[in-house]
Image (cartoon, grey):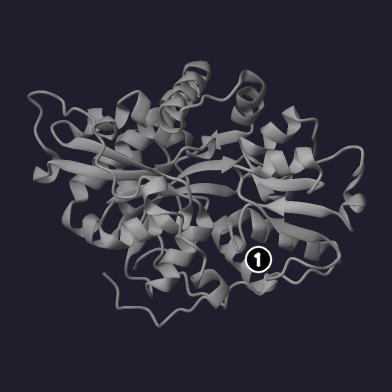
Amino acid sequence: MPATPAPRRTLAVLAALPLLALAACGYGSQAKENTEQAIAGAAKVDGLDSVRIGYFGNLTHATALVGRHERLFQKELGGTRAEYIPFNAGPSEIEALNSGSIDIGWIGPSPAVNGYLKSNGENLRIISGSASGGVKLVVDPEKIKSLDDVKGRKIATPQLGNTQDVAFLNWISERGWKVDAQSGKGDVSVVRTDNKITPDAYKSGSIDGAWVPEPTASKLVAEGGKVLLDEADLWPGEKFVITNVIVRQDFLKEHPKAVEALLRGSVRTNKWIDANPEKAKAAANAQLKADTGKPLPAGVLDPAWQSIQVTDDPLASTLGTEAEHAVKAGLLEQPDLRGIYDLTPLNKVLRAEGESTVDDAGLGVK
């Protein structure tokens, strides 16, 4: 491992992002339905009884949803049980990782960066990509007919300083408009609204649109909203990181075979998704129903699924760009992200699977 990097700091607004109630997000849950049955007669990986895996009940975590539902991770873990802990928000998953309540997890780029910086680069590594895309600006077509019409309107983002919030603030800035990042006040009113209540806020008219991930974007469309902009169109090659795989550094060091097994499961799950898109979509929705009690209706599921691309590539250069956008918005001090990635185990798995290796954009361990 490299020498401990120089101290890194985030602004208080990010450090103070609220955790959701731990019981609500399943933090530390040991519920029977969240534990897989180990494969009878199979050896335990690294001698572990179980590996604890975190993810969100969200389509942008499709790899985790499908891999769990189809037992593809359990297949690679053999006699070691896969234990799953679904979360509702990034900060609570980072807290669980830092406390040792989970070992590995699927998470968005902003909480991964925040978690890395707040621990002075000591607690986590990004070890794989998982998904790209799936973020849209959806608006009320009666009020907003063009991009210029966004000025003066109330637009929701999921949370102050989260990935979509930063992207929207950067887009506003590039159009020459001014908004105070912390208050959300300015040429556009940025209204931080939990994704769960954004559709109701839209229906009530309290917001005029939202810059949100799937499936919230497609839920707004189902309520009469119109997609004004797909964030993918703003990125080179229409690709940008929306979900990563992270791991505790001590777990990576002490249990490398378990990490490789899960990464092999992730790579093979993504292959299966690409080869079986309809079955994969159904599997993801079935797992969403199991996690949340409610599946997505076809009118929401189908367009949402089409806009998300699973990928093993962490698209590391786009993570660096997203961090630069947060700095520009005044939500993050200039970060040192060198060492946030360790793609060695992933590239080992990719080579064994006959796939191309991926790059850390100079942000990997040395």
Q: Residue at x 53, y 39 (%)?
A: 60
Graded by Cα atoms within 10 Å as few (under 14), some (14 to 19) or many (20 or more), the crowding at tag 1 reads many
Q: Quadrant of residue 184?
A: bottom right
Residue 136 seen:
no
The front one of 237 and 117 is: 117
Q: Is residue 47 above or below residue 165?
A: above
x, y percent for residue 264: 31, 37
Count of marks, rendered view: 1
Q: Quadrant of residue 307?
A: top right
Q: Residue at x 89, y 58 (%)?
A: 152
Q: Is residue 1 above or below residue 241?
A: below
Name the residue tied to disc 1. 325
Residue 134 seen:
yes
Q: Residue at x 81, y 54 (%)?
A: 154
x, y percent for residue 306: 62, 28
Q: Quadrant of residue 36?
A: top left
- Left-right relation of 234 to 348: right
x, y percent for residue 211: 71, 48
Q: Amino acid at mark 1?
A: His
The front one of 188 and 41 is: 188
Q: Quadrant of the C terminus?
A: bottom left
x, y percent for residue 344: 32, 53
Q: Quadrant of the N terminus?
A: bottom left
- Left-right relation of 99 to 239: left
Q: Secondary structure at mark 1?
A: helix
